[in-house]
Amino acid sequence: MLSRSTTLQLCVGFRSLSSASMSLLPRRERQVLAPGGGFIGVCQLTALHPVLQCSWPPLPPVCLADMAFPRNQKLNLLRLTVLLIVALAGIKFIFRDSVTLDQHKHISRDNDFWGKAGEEKEEPNPHSQALERSAAKVTGPKEDTKKQLSKDFSTTEMRLVHLDLKGAAPKVSYLEQVFPLLSKLGANGILVEYEDMFPFKGELETLKSPYAYSEDDIEKIQQLAALNKLEVVPLVQTFGHVEFILKHDKYRYLREVERFPNSLNPHVPDTLSLLKSVLSQVMDKHRHSSWIHIGADEVFHLGEGMDSKNWISRSNGDVGKMYLNHIKEVVNFIVSQYKGLQVLMWDDMLRKISVGAIQESGIATHASPVLWFYAPDFDTEQIGKFISKYADSGFKSVWFASAFKGTTGPAQGWTPLNYHLKNHLSWLKVIQAMAKFPFIRFQGIALTGWQRYDHYSVLCELLPVGIPSLAICLQTLVNGGFTEATKKKILDMLGFQTINLEKSTCDGNGAFPGSEVYRMVEQINGQLKESIAKALEEESAIKGWFSPYHRKHQFGNPRNLEHFGSKVLKVHEDWENFIQNFRSQLESIYFPDTVEEWMEENVNPYMDRLREFVRDYREIIRLNAKPKAL
């Protein structure tokens, strides 16, 4: 800031300068500088800013008309004018630096809120830290980065392909191959149900599979999805279908019914704490996701546990309200911790709950129901009633769920194409009729591809086996029906010549990721059992000279055995070579546990019978017609 003495000196100096210079100005310059016929005194200029204010009253204005001076002094006048301008500029410069310095001091003081780099900070109170850690266990990690990346999907119809990883989870290298195909077929997102394939850590580490993805794998999956314009929607079960959690002794006490590991007990405080930890670990690895699916379907045995019965008795409540109370807690945690994240949930448990109860719970503010129906010709009018109900309940948007595989039997090995096509044609009717529901918006559809019916069931169709069905279903949705033009697109993309919907077969070698597995599973599914049965059961010589009795007592005549032996040995050799190649193909896509499980369920029951027959045959031939063993 300018000192008071400096300001006074400037004012006095300018006063003298003004008096001297005014007498030198020619009339032409006077008119230019003062068109109104007057000139403002220098000390009056000080009124323009407090820094330049003088302590005495301002001088009266000097009238240029009262001044006269000879023309020969023009040069001196111009010099004085230049000096005046330079002096004024100097004052302005000094004043600016002073104010800027003062402003910087204020900014510096404000920045102390964030702390200075390298500055030592006051040691936190240990007791406060303990309280924060305790709170974190309940509310999840406390971070400043929990705002999800904001994206606008208001005009986008989502088509999510469901990856059910609770069985036959593919290696990331296979996903890298298949994601471009999903995008090409018309998908714009993936619904990833990790279950025990997520790399849980800390207290939750016991939940993960020995073959769980690594944290780097999770990041790679999201990078690959982004590269192929696929939105990643994680699915975390939060009420029913939590067998992968409740099977562990550590969490057995959280079961709704002690005997069954299906559903959580919503009345035990640790249930919500556990779910918050699970959700936090998953969402902290999905910072770019716009949605999270909390499952919440098929909460079997809810209300049958003693805690639930006591709650119903005390609260005069019902199972529906109990369900909504738990879902409300889960939803509120998610939206409070992850700003901008939207919640999806399966709708089946909501179907029997009243509109009023749903409205009162408030879940419709932040969640959207996902209506799932997998039958080929479901009742579209009934679906319409559910949509109206959810609109009345306050939900802003609704999703649908179809199926491209995994819904025609828990041990289904080959995908029935026509069945799943009809399911999607039914959903198309519903989608095309959404104009009848102006108060709720259709956001998207998830094409589910179940790999197990639940955590304890056997594997359904492998993903490569279901890809032709997925292609048919996706392209049907994209094109509004299954036309000849749509069929041709599918054939071109998959590398087939023809598709037979009724027989669920595709002619041609195929040229999509996993097409080798598709072809080989087709052979196993259609030929393995039959060819072995034919070799071992239809040969009369086997029945006559190599019965179970002969094999048990290890005796036989090589002359008779050789009538059928060469054919059986050839069948055995061919299938062993085939299975060895097939195993290699499986191992390129799946982890060892999946390979072993699929072989145990679909190959070994038939091959083991053939292997045992060949072993006994070779042993008895070696005995060279010795008497039977007693």
Image: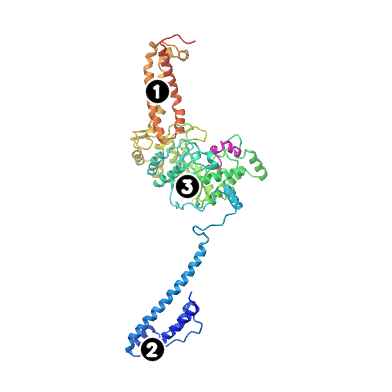
Q: Pick the residue in front: 352 or 28.
A: 28
Q: Residue drawn 61% across and 36% down?
A: 258
- Mark 2 vs mark 3: in front: 2
- Mark 1 vs mark 3: in front: 3
User: Mark 1 vs mark 3: which is more N-terminal?
Assistant: 3
Give percent across and percent down for residue 138.
Answer: 58, 47
Residue 589 to residue 276: above or below:
above
Q: Report the span colored magenta.
A: 237-256
Q: Which mark is residue 23?
A: 2
Give percent across and percent down for residue 225.
Answer: 41, 45
Residue at the disc numbered 1: 531
Give percent across and percent down for residue 294.
Answer: 52, 44
Q: Is residue 448 magenta?
A: no
Q: Which element is circle 1 on? A: helix
Residue at the disc numbered 3: 286
In this rendering, does residue 355 appear at all?
Answer: no
Q: Which element is circle 2 on? A: loop
Give percent across and percent down for residue 529.
Answer: 42, 24
